[in-house]
Amino acid sequence: MMGKTLIAYFSRKGENYVAGQIRHLEKGNTKIVAKKIQNLIGGDLYEIKPVIPYADDYDTCIQQAKQDLNENKRPLIATPLPNLEGYETIYIGYPNYWGTMPMHVFTFLEEQNLKDKHIKPFCTHEGSGMGHSESDLIQICQDAYLEKGLAIIGSNVSTCDDLLRRWV
């Protein structure tokens, strides 16, 4: 019998860099992809919400994210961590911030027991792909089975259904 699936993701609405310009998004791109995955395979959704959210303003947000990365911070998560017992597969979604995952995703992963879990990362970006996030995941998820990740251009999330179907 297959275990349950969790789709955990960090996403940010507000000002985002999309198709070469700053646009206001009502929903973050990674959240849209996470919900599409849930529609395809079922599973439980968990949003990694920061205690202190990044600024709505794009330029301020990327500076905050850069500072978190440079200081190797592990920012607090507002939503209680899910109990991963019984989950076999964990999809982990995030936007590419400075070549890797937002530091909140590091917090989430490092505070979990990932032993023998199948980890399937997906990333939204505007040209930088997965960056070095898969290398970072190899370090964090040493006791897990890390599967090949999927990078989706943020401005293409509304039309990525076929890509997702082939990947999930």
Image (cartoon, grey):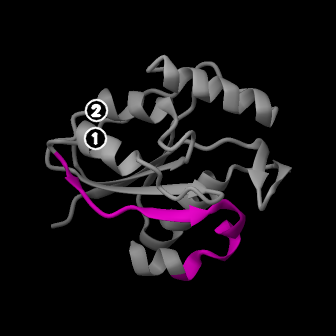
Q: Position of residue 20 (x, y in %)?
A: 80, 58
Q: Amino acid at mark 2?
A: Gln
Residue at image x 27%, y 61%? Answer: 147
Crowd band around label 2 with a 10 angstrom C-alpha radius: few (<14), some (14–19), many (20+): few
Residue at image x 32%, y 64%? Answer: 148
Q: Amino acid at mark 1?
A: Leu
Identify residue for label 2: 112
The mark closer to the camera, 1 or 2, is: 2
Whether residue 76 can be seen here = no
Crowd band around label 1 with a 10 angstrom C-alpha radius: few (<14), some (14–19), many (20+): some
Instruction: Please give the count of numbered marks on the rendered protein.
Output: 2
Q: Is residue 121 above or below residue 51?
A: below
Q: Is residue 163 above or below residue 4?
A: below
Q: Which residue is nearer to you in this view: 131 or 78?
A: 131
For the residue labelled by badge 2, is the local secondary structure a helix, a strand or a loop?
Answer: loop
Q: Which residue is nearer to you in this view: 80 or 132?
A: 132
Residue at image x 22%, y 59%? Answer: 3
Residue 131 falls inside the magenta stretch: no
Identify residue for label 1: 84
Q: Position of residue 118 (x, y in %)?
A: 24, 56
